Amino acid sequence: MRIGATRIGATVLGYPRIGPKRELKHAVEGYWAGRLDEAGLREVAEGLRADTWRELSTLDSIPGNTFSYYDQVLDTAVLFDAVPERHRALGMGPLDTYFAMARGTAEVAPLELTKWFDTNYHHLVPEVGPGTRFALVGDKPLAEYREALALGVATRPVLIGPVTFLLLAKPADGAPADFSPLTLLDPLVDRYAELLAALARAGVEWVQLDEPAFALDRSPGELAALQSAYDRLAALPQRPALLVAGYFAELGDALGVLADTAVEGVAVDLVAGRADLDRIPVLTGLRDKAVVLGLVEGRNVWRTDLRDAAATGAGLLGAVGAVGVSTSCSLLHVPYDLDAEPGLDPVVRARLAFARQKVEEVTLLGRVLLGGEPVDLLTASADAVAAGVASARSDASVRARLAELTPHDRTRMPYADRADAQESRLRLPALATTTIGSFPQTGAVRRARADLGRGVLDEAGYDRLMREEIEHVIRLQEEIGLDVLVHGEPERNDMVQYFAERLDGFAHTELGWVQSYGSRCVRPPILHGDVSRPAPMTVRWAEYAQSLTPRPVKGMLTGPVTILAWSFVRADQPRSDTADQVALALRDELADLEAAGIGVIQVDEPALRETLPLRTADRGAYLEWAVAAFRLATSGVAPWTQVHTHLCYSEFGDVIAAIDALDADVTTIEAARSRMEVLSDLAAIGYARGVGPGVYDIHSPRVPGSGELSDLLAEALRAVPARRLWANPDCGLKTRTYREVEPALRNLVEAATRARLTA
Ligand code: GLN
Ligand code: ZN
């Protein structure tokens, strides 16, 4: 071990930064709106950082540089001057250039936003090309280190590792199509070397370099890049001790690679990457390294059985140079503080730990496992977890239904027969037009919901406003000439929360905010017990909408996979069982919609692709339960009821067979931006049911002309016959305005009408 490097002991890999009451969100948005000046914003940020360091003071090693005004990947790009020309050319100051990269301006597009591995956090995608010249232009990690030191706290700056940074980057505009950002590794490592030297000069003892990109299967070339980067960084004459962290899955081969380098420490995720546990003792390269064991789950909200965690850790005490204990990943993905939730059911609450409680858990674990304090200190935690599992809401009737399920419950009549029955019932034209569900959520709609929440508006008044809105949306669609209508979802705050609030087995927080991207935060529901449906959830709205029009109105539900993906999910039983419980509740909802005369029902699964496990070896099992749950939800209806599903967020290649296996009658799918590629992928695997490739990109305010929509439909018609093809936008319209939506939908109907003539 490097001379002088103290032990890491108990630590966490990162911490939330948005503020316990979303102070940073309010400050940043205030700055954007011109209500707060730069100095005011910086003051809020400084206060939040100081609070965080105080919060973490019980740890042996305190992570630093965990703060961000927007995103840690963007911070890294700016730190090394990977600023695209279009943002640089705006000629703004550093902070405004930073926000322009994050959000774009009237003139220039922002960096692309994408999911941070398999979490619900989104990071910005750096753009690099052969012309990129990295330079160490920023000093954020150093400045925050000094700021903490001035408060008496020596931190361990956390950086995104150079290899992960490049693996997350995409080729800049104008770069050759086959340009690989990884070819820039050497010059980037040189800049990291400068940064490490500067940190060492300032007295930094340890630096954490995050390499979560190695939680995915990586090629030999990528593993070699990892080796080369850390061989070079470890060989620097002046640098802090290096802790390389992997998380979200096992490090696998990458752990062996890191063991062979001369870095001082590695951090492994022993919750999501349990398989690394067996690798650690056999890797001789780890015998002189610190191995930081991620034993407290960083991305879910359950208490840890610390006795169990200590037993796992104890098994490695002699096998490596030094053991440290930590959260499995950064705590960025959980809410701040359970103590801010007095309203939670005490039985549920007793099972939970948010960021602050997880810091306490790690601290206690360290005292016992590393500090020699009595194991008895961990009994309470073990008992609480056992009691929590025993007290989880149990619903005998749901369990009995699950136990009796047979494959028959997940199977509908053959598609050809269903298609005939649906055709004679619905009498839709070829190339039928529809939308994905939501219509613009106007100020009035949001206000009504807020007023209901604050008690200013009563249920009856709220109902009246929603009905007016639904009628407006129905009339508009009739007038535009769409074929399958929707009620517009005005009553939904969020497509998962709406259902979670109406199902038993979920809890909700007041302040359980988690950063989604930038200033956007979400409050995921907590799925803690058996799930069941006390009453119909959507029927009265759908029924009302259908009563207004002779055209079919599509019922609108969120699928089991997406409900799980955007919630904190119980860990005391397999996800497949939990998904089936949610599916049974939805199955009853579909039956009720059908009984109410709804002939078309859409079950949205936008999260199907994004929940795909990082390691290919884990994907088959996931897709199996995901598809099974969807089919359980949707197979109970009659053959003449048409089931739609909707998927978004692109890159369907990996799940194309699963999409087919969902066995929906119609699949609407994001395709406008990928030029209909998904259609040939579907055709290639023999998909032969209805498909609605989104021809209109709702993520942009631009109104597509009927000419370009016709072109896209013509292109789609080359892959799919007209009677199976649908014309629709690529996602819900709730974030758009009527000014954009109305002309766009008119153009869509016009394009479809024209295409019918030629098809
Ligand atoms: N039905 C939802 C809507 O239209 C689907 C949203 C989504 O795919 N994310 O808003
Ligand atoms: Zn969508």
Image (cartoon, grey):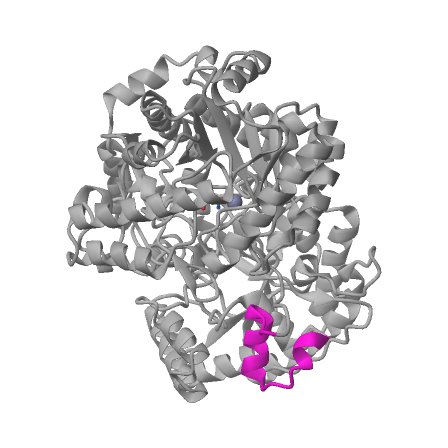
User: Which quadrant is the N terminus positioned in?
Assistant: bottom right
Verify whether residue 656 appears in magenta. no
Q: Quadrant of the C terminus?
A: top right
Please report the bounds of the magenta region as a residue range: 85-106
Residue sitting at x 49%, y 80%: 144
Return the x and y of residue 20 as percentages of the image width and height. 32, 66
The answer to whether residue 357 of the structure is visible from this angle is no
Q: Examine the image and state in which quarter residue 432 appears.
A: top right
- Front-most of residues 271 and 339: 339
| Numbered-mark total | 0
Horizontal side of residue 389 vs 606, given as left or right: left
Horizontal side, residue 334 vs residue 383: left or right:
right
Q: Quadrant of residue 405?
A: top left
* Relative image position of residue 97 (x, y in whole percent): 59, 79
Q: Is residue 307 above or below residue 40?
A: above
Residue placed most toward the observer, 335 or 277: 335
